[in-house]
Amino acid sequence: LERRARISGEPTGLVIKADSYVAAVWNGQEWIALPRSARTLSTGVAISSPAPVPTTRDTLGDAETLTQPQIAFDPLGHSALTNIELRAGNREVVLPISAGSSS
């Protein structure tokens, strides 16, 4: 996503939902889910941080309008990065996200 932002000149991001995540792009007015980028977490796995956000469908129902991503990649490299924390049962794993990572 970071590379896509730099190449396209458009901000990109990762929106965390309760049981899934989706890549998004800023279209100049709102965040839109990238086609075929949604991934569902395995049964029993949850994202504990950053906190999941709600989403809505647009009036046509063919594109998902999203709130601002918890992890954003700016085309100029000024990215809002945070760790992703996964929880499964009593285990927790922290995935660090850093500038220059292969996203």
Image: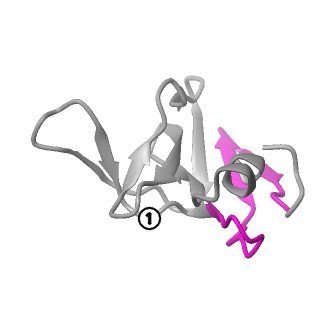
Q: Measuring 46% from the left and 28% from the top, which residue is drawn there?
A: 35
* Image x and y of residue 26, in percent: 46, 57
Report whether 70 appears left or right of 66.
right
* Image x and y of residue 94, in percent: 80, 54
* Residue 11 magenta-highlighted: no
> Helix, strand or loop at disc 1?
loop
Say what amino acid the circle numbered 1 marks: Gln
> Residue 44, relative to residue 49: is it above or below?
above
Q: Measuring 52% from the left and 40% from the top, which residue is drawn there?
A: 22
Report whether 56 appears left or right of 9.
left
Q: Residues within 10 Å of mark 1 (few under 14, many from 20)?
A: some
**Who is closer to the viewer here, 39 or 36?**
36
Q: Measuring 71% from the left and 70% from the top, which residue is drawn there?
A: 79
Quadrant for residue 13, please give it. bottom right
Most extreme residue toward the bottom, as rendered?
A: 78
Q: Measuring 69% from the left and 64% from the top, which residue is drawn there?
A: 75
Q: Which span is picked out in magenta?
A: 72-98
**Who is closer to the viewer here, 36 or 21?**
36
> Residue 92, relative to residue 36: is it above or below?
below
Colouring used for the render = one colour
Residue under numbered circle 1:
68
Quarter holding the C terminus is: top right
Quadrant for residue 42, please give it. top right
* Image x and y of residue 65, in percent: 30, 49
* Image x and y of residue 100, in percent: 89, 57
